[in-house]
Image (tube, rainbow, N blue to C red):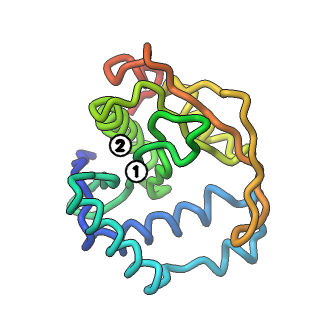
Amino acid sequence: MTHKIRPGVPEDVEAREYVRVATWKTAYRGIMPDDYLDALKVEPDAVAGMEEGLAGALAEGRTPLLVGEIGGRIAGFVNFGRCRDERIGGGEVFALYVLPEAQADGLGYALMTAAVERLRADGHEEIGLWVAAGNAQARHFYERFGFVSSGRVQRHSAPLPPVEEVHYRLSPSTNSATAGTNISG
């Protein structure tokens, strides 16, 4: 199915949150407690805060959110920007989620490619991301895209259940034209 990638706007935040919640409920089964995942829902207060944050970023000329549409409906998104950890530096992909039913359509690859292109255009040669150590499907996707483990590990806790995360990096020599050449769809 054909998809469209575009910059996210504040009106997309609720749909973005729906995608995140729906994806977490499947992607993190067996990694996070079922009762935590079953209780996840789109929180209106969180949506309002994210809408405000995105509006501020857009007003500053930043585009930290790209959404992917299939049939006019948001089916995935990617958030990215300057790395949150100054010790690591470079750019960072903060979140990449695609609805489970759209994961074989190449939307994740298209979103990641667009985010890498934007980060590189903003001068970030190194690009990193954190992924749950137990999320084999996501790790495999990132590795096929060209990301490699940096060896860094961190443990997330409150307000989330404790989860070990591993850090991946995409080297400057991996460009968007060659990244993801092992990914079909």
| Residue that sits furthest to the top in the current view | 173
Q: Which residue is mark 1?
A: 78
The residue sitting at 65% across, 37% down in the picture is 167
Crowd class of label 1 (few under 14; some 14 to 19; many from 20; radius 10 Å): many
Residue 126: image location, x then y, percent: 47, 27
Q: Secondary structure at mark 1?
A: strand
* Residue 161 percent location from the top left of the image: 76, 67
| Quadrant housing residue 16 | bottom left
For residue 141, above or below residue 158 = above
Mark 1–mark 2 Cα distance, whole angstroms, equals: 6 Å
Residue 136, which numbered label?
Answer: none
Q: Are marks 1 and 2 in contact (CB under 8 Å)?
A: yes
Q: For the residue labelled by badge 2, is the local secondary structure a helix, a strand or a loop? A: helix
Position of the C terminus, as image quadrant, is top left
Residue 165 lies, in percent from the top left, at 71, 46
Q: Is residue 172 above or below residue 75?
A: above
Q: Is residue 3 above or below residue 88?
A: below
In this orientation, which residue lies closer to the viewer: 34 or 159? Answer: 159
Foreground residue, 81 or 130?
Answer: 81
The residue pinned by badge 2 equals 111
What amino acid is at disc 1? Val
In terms of image quadrants, where is residue 173? Answer: top left
Comparing 182 with 60, the one in front is 60
Q: Please state the horizontal and vertical placement of residue 157, each as a whole percent of the image.
A: 76, 63
What's the residue at 47%, 33% (across, down)? 90
Q: Is residue 39 left or right of residue 161?
A: left
| Badge 2 amino acid | Leu
Q: Earlier in the sequence, mark 1 or mark 2?
A: 1
User: Furthest residue to the front?
Assistant: 86
Of all residues shown, which one is farthest toward the bottom?
44
Identify the residue at image location x=72%, y=75%: 36
